[in-house]
Amino acid sequence: MDGMGLIGRVHVGIMRFAERTVVARRRGDVGDTYRNLRIGMVILILMLAFAVIVESARSKDILPSIRDYHDTSVRAVFIATVCAMGVMLMAYKGRSEIEDVLLNHVGPSRVLRGVPAHRNP
């Protein structure tokens, strides 16, 4: 043994692997992250819209509010969309200090709003 313990050898092995395989970060990674967040938000909205359209067609009834779909078969998609959107809003950085504070406030409130009190639909 060369005086290096198991953890030291594992660390050296991981560092050698990383040096060979990890690519340096590109300059546009932050922009890519924000673009992916925006795309994710659009996908969530489309997913919820699709679920609402399918439920409306199935029940042959259009409810007056998106909130009213919470008590239908759309419930799981509704809760998942609201919670995921809240997390995305927290991750998104605003262009100004005020916008950033508002996004950081709205994010957790959306997550809390997505987790409703227990009731049977």
Image (cartoon, rainbow, N blue to C red):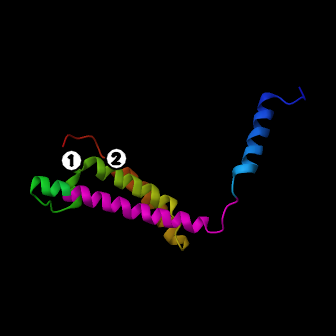
Q: Which residue lies furthest to the top in this view?
A: 1
For the residue carrying disc 1, how many other residues have a C-alpha within 10 Å: few (<14), some (14-19), or many (20+)?
some
Is residue 109 visible from the viewing direction of this image? Answer: no
Q: Which residue lies furthest to the bottom in this view?
A: 96
Point out the stretch of residues depicted in magenta.
24-53
Above or below — where is 1 with respect to 81?
above
Residue 41 position within the rendered picture, expressed as x and y whole percent measured from the top left = 40, 62
Q: Which of 87 and 108 is in front in this view?
A: 87
Residue 39 is a magenta residue: yes
Residue 31 position within the rendered picture, expressed as x and y whole percent measured from the top left = 57, 68
Q: Which quadrant of the figure has residue 54?
A: bottom left
Q: Residue at x 24, y 55 (%)?
A: 51
Image mark count: 2
Identity of the amino acid at label 2?
Val
The residue indicated by pointer 2 is 115
Q: Which of 97 and 34 is in front in this view?
A: 34
Marks 2/1: CA distance? 16 Å
